[in-house]
Amino acid sequence: MSKSWFPFYGGDFLKATMDLTPEEIGCYVLLLIHYYQHGGLPESSKNLAVITKCSGRKWRAIAQALAPKFESGWVNTRAEKELIKQQEIAAKRQKAGRGGGLAAQAKLRKQMLKQMGTQPQPYRLSSSESPEAPKSGLSISDELKDLLAKKPH
């Protein structure tokens, strides 16, 4: 899941990073950005060094300071909770949007019918039609195929 933003709670961040140097804070921010964009961090030190723009030697020193901010495997509990929250919100919005779209379609259809001066009517068979045997002797699907074949596209 790719995200172009992530929630940032300044007070919480400052409290959690009081023990870090400015350089370590910069690396921590780069890791958090990657975490939210990709749904996690790689475990490879080489890859983490690339993400933080550090040499391998520099990353090993910084990693010792940042490791307590993560669980085993470079999992950030706060980021995980926020990602789950974002997924839940997205699912709710998708469901609401789908329902809203259907409601909007129905409303538009009613407006169009009103402008045309008609009301939606349920389909009823005339007295000469029977549901078992269409008047032409063809099946309903054959009649539809014939109508579609004759209809100009």
Image: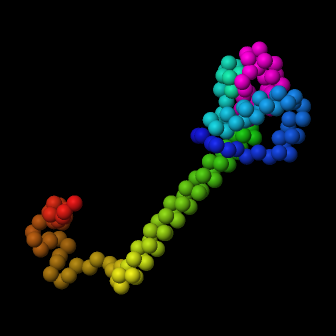
Magenta run includes residue 62: yes
Estimate the x, y position of residue 11 in percent, counting from the top left.
86, 45
Estimate the x, y position of residue 10 in percent, counting from the top left.
83, 45
Quarter of the image where one finds residue 61: top right
Which quadrant: the C terminus? bottom left
Residue drawn at x 20%, y 82% is 126
Estimate the x, y position of residue 50 in percent, counting from the top left.
68, 23
Magenta run includes residue 143: no
Quarter of the image where one finds residue 81: top right
Q: Is residue 32 left or right of residue 138?
A: right
Inspect this view and state whether residue 68 appears.
no
| 95 versus 72 height, above or below | below
Which quadrant: the N terminus? top right
Q: Is residue 128 left or right of residue 56?
A: left
Which stretch is magenta? 52-76
Identity of the residue furthest to the top in this view: 57
Quarter of the image where one finds residue 34: top right
